[in-house]
Amino acid sequence: MLSTFSSVSRRSQAKVRLFFSKVRLIIFLLAALVIFSFNLNNERFSSIRAIIFDHTSIMTKFITSPIRSIAEVKTWIDSYLKIHHKNKKLEIKLKQMEEWALKAHALALENQQLRQLLKISPDPQMSYITAPVLGIVQAPYTKTIVLGAGSKKGIKLRQPVVMGQHIVGRIVEVSEQASRVLLIQDVNSHIPVILEKSKVQGIASGNDESHLIIKFFEMEAKAEIGELIFTSGVGGIYPKGYLVGRVAYQNGEIVRVKSLIRLNELEYVHVFVDMELPEENIKPSRDIKGVS
Amino acid sequence: MKSLTTFLFMAQPSIYLLISSIICLLIPNSILHISPDFSFPFIFFWTIFKPELLPLSILLVVGIVSDSIQGLPLGFHSVLFLCSSMILLSQRSFLYHQSFPLVWAVFGLSLIFYKILEQLILRSFMEFPFSLSNLTLSMLFTVSLYPLCAKLSYLNLKKVINLS
């Protein structure tokens, strides 16, 4: 009698436990759904996201540091093995550059004189800050880099990020101490570009792979293999005249561009902090359906 | 000392999940789109064989951390992990006593549902080029990765049972 009672009691206890575990699962799933939908649709949630990002940016640095160390060792070995060959190459390049520097100086003077004659207003001076790269995040669905400078240093959403004369991307997430740059190779990145020789304009978009794909504004526009691609400055987000990459492949309408930046070697980048960005209704972090 | 060892063994499934959800950052970009899913084998194993060691709160938190690191909207991975956990829990009583080949086959089937769910949630907020061949390869690699993850988790599970 007692054993029957205890087995019934055990069974009912198990049922109650199962019921509560199901309730708990539904509560957690609802919580995750609320966080997900708030994150997509509510601007106020960005401050919470920024706090989490501040903490995870340190983790990103820690996780990606082995790759960076391997890349550094590889670069060091490569440069050590090719030191003699590289020295000769650099000597030739230096002579060429000296000639180019003289020409550039003369052209700059001529340009200045012509601008004065035509009374063209000078290009706005853009000030930038230099930010260290904490980590390169190349995940299955995103390609971003995390910078060790945030809103405290004047970084804001959508500001362009460059490395020398190369365009790197734009800011899509900012916290106090860190910020995230959407790389030009990311599928959500779309940059107005211009071809070096034909001056044809188009939009370079990131692809699932490492190349960018250009869609031209003009039908039947063609690009030469090896031709350089620059930012056109259209739209006002990216400054004009920065290098996007080089044409690597063309098949019909599809033009693939290879970025000339070696991501693993990125240590510091420049963020244009004083650039006046146009107002836009598109949510900057992601191309969200229904909003754009 | 013994309680610390026990805690570490108990926490291992959560640590596995955290590592597996961010390990994709170490994969070279050229093979990233066909790389296996490292998280799902662990979620599958622990949800079937010892769900108490992979609590729902861990699935929620690891999902959020993973999203924040990868730059995805927060909650994306949490929803994915919790949904798959909910489906697996409903099949737990059937799968618990089955042979390994059958569990492996069910893992393959569950992975298809998991990937469909992932693509559906992903497409709700961003455009992403879809490649069936890449997805198939990634799934094949994940299926072949399962025995290794299961072995690793099984050794851990045995240790936890012995300790408790």
Image: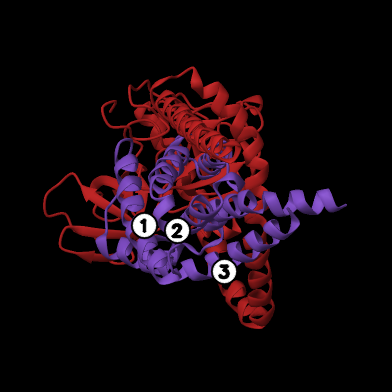
Q: From the top left corner, tell me how far across and down residue A93 is, in percent.
A: 56, 70
According to the colouring, which chain is red? A
What mark, if any, has residue A271 been given in the picture?
none
Q: Which residue is mark 1?
A: B111
Q: What amino acid type should be assigned to the residue bearing mark 3?
A: Lys
Which residue lies most toward the top here? A44
Q: Position of A76 compared to A139: left or right?
A: right
Q: Nearer the viewer, mark 1 or mark 3?
A: 3
> Which of the pair A46/A96 is nearer the observer?
A46
Name the residue at the front extreme: A1
- Indicate which disc residue B151 carries: 3
- Which chain is drawn using purple? B
Q: Quadrant of the N terminus of chain A?
A: top right
Subunit under mark 3: B
Report whether residue A84 is seen.
Answer: yes
**Percent x, y for residue B30?**
43, 66
Q: Do circles 3 and 2 both sit on a common chain?
A: yes
- Subunit under mark 2: B
Instruction: Inspect the image, locate mark 2, and give the three-letter code of the amino acid beneath it.
Output: Asp
Disc 2 to disc 1: CB gap under 8 Å = yes
**SS for tag 2?**
loop
Labels 2 and 1 positioned on one and the same chain: yes
Rendered location of residue A241, percent (x, y): 40, 44
